[in-house]
Amino acid sequence: MLGNKSINKDNHLEIAGCDVVSLAQTMGTPLYVYDEALLRSNMQEYEKSFRENYPHFSLAYAGKAFLCSALCSIIKEEDWWLDVVSGGEYYLASTANFPVEKIIFHGNNKTNEERRLVLREGVGRWVVDNEVELNLLLEEASSYASYKVPLFFRLTPGVDPHTHQYITTGKIDSKFGFLLGEAENAILKAIQSEDLEVWGLHCHIGSQIDHIEPFLKAAEVMLQFMVDFRKKHGFVFRELDLGGGLGVPYTDEEKSRFPSSHFYVKEISEKVKEMCGELSYPLPRLYIEPGRSVVNTAGSTIYRVGSVKEIPGIKKYVAVDGGMTDNPRPVLYGAKYQAHIGNRVAGEREKVSVVGKCCESGDVLIEEIELPSPSPGDVLVVEATGAYNYSMASNYNLIPRPGVVFIREGEPELVVRPENWYDLVRRDITPLE
Ligand code: LLP
């Protein structure tokens, strides 16, 4: 099992001390459930590791992994920054009273509306992704912003992290960021502008990365760029943001495959200190932007089993009341998950396929898993769904998206209500009779 889970005397699964059977009964299914204490301790572990290893740093949570107002409050309380990648994420954070001066604003194609909103309301660091964006910013900054816009420049360091190709971003062939050779002139233009302030550089090489070397390589390329730039132009970058990307286990089998956040922080800190020492470069303030490694293990999805179909000698399909609409990752990336029968954790097992309710044969959540004789009415719990599930959910087949519960000190609290059918039709414009 992953995270803070246990089996109680009734053979039920408990998440952070909460019986999933009563959760399913009282809150309904499907339901995203987060263990708040685990989520916070993941954040605190990062914080502690940096304190032990690096003099000045800022931790930014990548909101694309999972974001809601209740989480914004936690990020604020833990004193983290927040990385947003759209006007929508920015809007959610600002309406949840998250301080805009701690927001890092990303995006490879920020729209007029997004740019102008953020310029007007304020931002901690604006990550310039490309030349077109920089030119727009140079035109707009003085009219929309009453402050010098604090900038990072996103570079593609040309490092291949060997993860799924859809979540690789730092290679030369990427839609994100400036090529190293092209960044120089753009950065100089920004340095010369009265309306912009260049603080540092940014890179993000990919996601669900299971070894440290590509992060170290990326840090090396970025620092070398900083050193070369100083040599040519006499300008010192005060900050360096190495993005997110640390992977986490999704199943018990994968538990030993991933470096801990502590090891990751220690290694990148040492690399930066070592290179800065050798090249006599002032230590930049270091930022990282973890998403998945903060929230994934803290989240699970609770479903109710409905139809069970056995094809003798071939397969047993166990269908739940959600599927690719609340978790598109198996379909998109071939992601593997593990699950339990929440009302009968221990028991004689059989091989089954867990599928969703969408009108699509590919709607398979778990291709093959051994579970104790799943039957209609059982509660099925899929583990490690905290990242890129809620945030990537859809309304395919007009299926409402599940609500979100945070478990706080053993008590469940609904922090996002489930969608209802009315939510699905309320944007339709009724034709005039
Ligand atoms: N910073 C930037 C600029 C990013 O693009 C990302 C993720 C992160 C930080 C956070 O990365 P993390 O620590 O979560 O790996 N939908 C895919 C993941 C896409 C990640 C996109 N960028 C999935 O479900 O695996």
Image: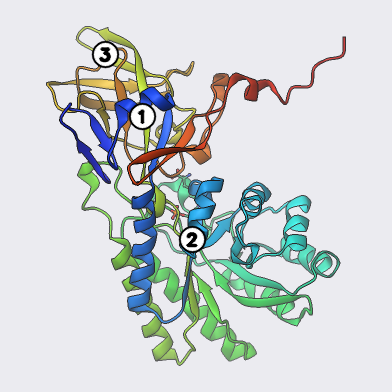
Q: Are marks 2 and 1 in contact (CB under 8 Å)?
A: no
Residue topped by disc 2 = 77
Residue at left offset 70%, top offset 24%? 426
Could you tell me which secondary element the residue under label 3 belongs to? loop
Cα separation between marks 2 and 1: 27 Å
Q: Earlier in the sequence, mark 2 or mark 1?
A: 1
Residue at left offset 80%, top offset 17%? 430
Q: Earlier in the sequence, mark 2 or mark 3?
A: 2
Residue topped by disc 3 = 375
Image quarter (top left, top right, bottom left or bottom right) of the C terminus: top right
- Quarter location, residue 20: top left
Estimate the x, y position of residue 285 in percent, counting from the top left: 50, 78
Q: Tell me the number on the disc at residue 23.
A: 1
244 relative to 269 in the view: left or right? right
Could you tell me which secondary element the residue under label 2 belongs to? helix
432 relative to 360 in the view: left or right? right
- Looking at the picture, which amino acid does disc 2 mark? Glu
Residue 169 visible at all: no
